[in-house]
Image (cartoon, rainbow, N blue to C red):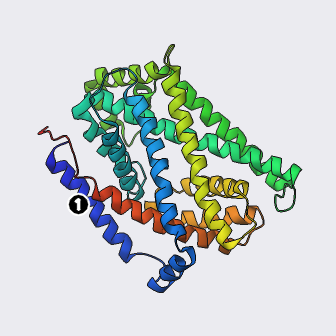
């Protein structure tokens, strides 16, 4: 990536952090009280995300290394991954900041087509792992209802919602599977070429970049193709495992407020809250959506909504620290290019 573009991303990240500081819903005294309540566990939560980000980076690294001997070191991929997530957190619509940054940083190592296809594949894997995680949470919720009952209520309304969600999630996973097997980039641009508002841009772009887009689709098919199942399933397993490990954060925080909370409680709350907040992905850091999602998720297992709000505020502090770290390391150890 050129120094000019890197400076742009860096200044954008710094500006977003400043805006976030001045638009926090919580007062300094409230944040101080949260920090005092969490105590040393707040540092533990920050450190917990080191292995989570390492798993995310390794999942992407497996995709990058699938069909080429790239010269990109793993720690460089780790740095790009952390910075990419930081930019995504502070960008409206989520993937509008971190993914272009990752592509531009990776291009000098593997070329534009491979960089684009690996980032697209990783995003698909990252999203697909969320749907697998949510499906698992539904199965856990139903199992706990029949095994322990209590706060895991399953009436006709809850059953209807969970059934609809299960059907939708399975359908999405099936669509992802088809995209992995057959490629989807050219088809997406072909579909965009039929939409009135974007047709004038999509059609010329497809015509002038058809060869590159077909090459990206070929690399997507290659990862899922015969003889290449290990990187595909390994990457998906790492992403799913990162979701499960992230539930430890909720478990630690829940036990501060509800001492008898179990890991499975945190698993269900984490999955249901992320499902709700991702429906409102247009908000930077999912502001408001995360809090509402955690309150609803806590209520779904008969915990007070205030528990979800308190947990959300604590995770915001950890998230903010990692955003600062991600933006701060952006300019360290980079591969410079004038293009």
Is 237 placed left or right of 189 in the picture?
Answer: right
**Residue 287 seen by the camera:** no
Q: Is residue 117 above or below residue 150?
A: above
Q: In the drawing, does residue 33 fall left or right of residue 64?
A: right
Residue 78 position, x and y percent, is 36, 44
Q: Which residue is more in the foreground, 288 or 141?
A: 141
Residue in the image at 84% along x and 58% along y: 153
Image point (63%, 40%), residue name: 132
The foreground one among 207 and 6 is: 6
User: What residue is shown at x 30% (from left), y 38% (from top)?
Assistant: 103
Q: Quadrant of the N terminus?
A: top left
Residue 277: horizontal and vertical position, in percent?
56, 58
Q: Quadrant of residue 266?
A: bottom right
Q: Residue furthest top?
A: 226
Q: Quadrant of residue 14?
A: bottom left
Crowd tier of the residue under label 1, counting other residues whose Cα lies within 10 Å: few below 14, some 14–19, many 20 or above: few
> Is residue 335 positioned above or below 205 on the image?
below
Residue that carries the numbered disc 1 in the rendered image: 11
């Amino acid at each position: 990536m050129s120094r000019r573009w890197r400076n742009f991303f860096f200044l954008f990240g710094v500006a977003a952090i400043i805006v976030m500081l001045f638009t926090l819903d919580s007062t300094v005294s409230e944040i101080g009280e949260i920090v005092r309540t969490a105590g040393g566990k707040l540092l533990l939560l920050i450190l917990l995300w080191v292995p989570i980000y390492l798993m995310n980076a390794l999942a992407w690294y497996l995709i990058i290394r699938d069909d080429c001997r790239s010269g990109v070191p793993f720690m460089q991929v780790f740095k790009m991954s952390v910075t990419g997530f930081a930019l995504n957190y502070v960008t409206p619509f989520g993937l509008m900041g971190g993914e272009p940054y990752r592509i531009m940083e990776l291009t000098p190592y593997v070329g534009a087509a491979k960089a684009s296809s690996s980032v697209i594949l990783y995003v698909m894997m990252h999203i697909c792992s969320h749907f697998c995680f949510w499906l698992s949470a539904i199965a856990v919720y139903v199992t706990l209802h029949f095994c322990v009952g209590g706060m895991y209520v399953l009436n006709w309304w809850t059953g209807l919602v969970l059934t609809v969600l299960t059907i939708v999630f399975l359908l999405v996973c099936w669509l992802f599977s088809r995209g992995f097997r057959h490629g989807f980039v050219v088809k997406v641009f072909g579909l965009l070429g039929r939409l009135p508002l974007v047709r004038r841009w999509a059609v010329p772009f497809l015509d002038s970049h058809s060869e590159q887009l077909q090459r990206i689709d070929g690399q997507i098919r290659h990862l899922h193709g015969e003889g290449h199942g290990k990187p595909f399933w390994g990457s998906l397993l790492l992403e799913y495992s990162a979701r499960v490990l992230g539930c430890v954060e909720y478990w630690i925080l829940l036990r501060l407020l509800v001492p008898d909370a179990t890991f499975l409680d945190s698993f269900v709350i984490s999955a249901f809250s992320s499902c709700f907040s991702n429906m409102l992905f247009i908000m930077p850091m999912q502001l408001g959506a995360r809090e509402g999602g955690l309150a609803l998720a806590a209520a779904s297992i008969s915990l007070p909504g205030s528990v979800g709000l308190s947990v959300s505020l604590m995770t915001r502090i950890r998230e903010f620290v990692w955003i600062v770290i991600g933006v701060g390391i952006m300019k360290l150890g980079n591969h410079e290019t004038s293009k």
